[in-house]
Amino acid sequence: MSTLRLTPRGLLAFGQLHPCTIGRTGLTEDKREGDGATPRGTLRLTAMLYRPDRLAAPAPWARPIRPGDLWSDDAEDPLYNRLVRAPHARSHEALRRADPLYDLILVTDWNAEGRPGAGSAIFMHQWRRPGWPTAGCIAPPRPALHRLAARLRPGDVILT
C-alpha cells in the first residue's frame, strides 16, 4: 500500500513533492457539502476514472467516464455521493466536462456511506492552474497526476 501525504508545501508521494491545490477554504475537521473545504483525515482511493476519448487508460483498474456519467451532490438524494447516470433529476456534477479537469479522476472513499450533507466528490484531479483552489478536491498539475495514477492502486491512502 502506498501513502501520499498532503503537506503545507504540496503532495508528498513516492519520495517526491508535487505542487497541488486544495479547497478554497482550506482543510477542515468538519466537512459539509458545499463548504469548499478539503477534509482532514485518511482518504482511501476507491476508483480511477478517465476520459477514453482524450487519453489511454492510465492503469489497468481505471474505468472509462462515459457520456451521461454524473456524480450526485444532493444530500437528500438516496444516491448521494455516488456515480449516477443521466438523466438524474437531483443535483449532480457532470464527470464529462468540456475542460480537462476531470480527464483523469482518482475517487476517494470520503463519505462513502453517503451521510447526508457530509460532503461528496472528494477527488484527486488535475488543477486548473497554480494557486487556483478547488471546491474541496486535491489537485496536482496534469503531468504529476498522470505519473501518480500509473503507480497508485485501489486502497492506497492520501493523508490530509
Image (tube, rainbow, N blue to C red):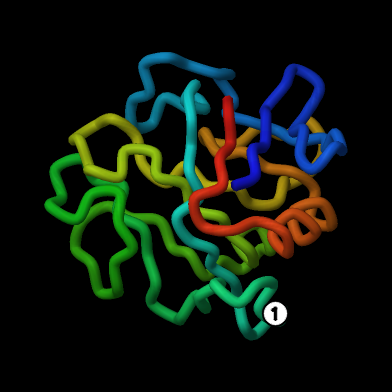
The residue where tag 1 is placed is 54
| In-front residue for pair 62/139 | 62
> Residue extending furthest bottom?
53
SS class of the residue under badge 1? loop
Q: Is residue 25 above or below residue 98?
A: above
Numbered disc total: 1
Q: Residues within 10 Å of mark 1 (few under 14, many from 20)?
A: few
Question: Residue placed at 52% from the left, 27% from the top?
Answer: 38
Rendered image quadrant of residue 29: top left
Q: Residue at the spot x=36%, y=58% of the render?
A: 71
Q: Position of residue 62 (x, y in %)?
A: 56, 72
Residue 51 appears left or right of 116: right
Which quarter of the rendering shows the C terminus? Answer: top right
84 sits to left or right of 61: left
Residue 17 in percent (x, y) is at 85, 34
Q: Residue at horizontal 52%, vertical 47%?
A: 123
Q: Which residue is the extreme one toward the front?
A: 1
Residue 68: where, in percent of width, then height?
38, 77
Q: Is residue 65 above or below residue 119?
A: below
Q: Quadrant of residue 7?
A: top right
Q: Residue at x 38, y 31 (%)?
A: 34
Q: Is residue 139 above or below residue 152?
A: above
Decide if residue 41 is on the left or right side of residue 124. Answer: left
Q: Is residue 63 left or right of residue 70?
A: right
Q: Nearer the viewer, residue 19 or 62?
A: 62
Q: Position of residue 37 (x, y in %)?
A: 50, 25
- Disc 1 marks a residue whose amino acid type is Arg
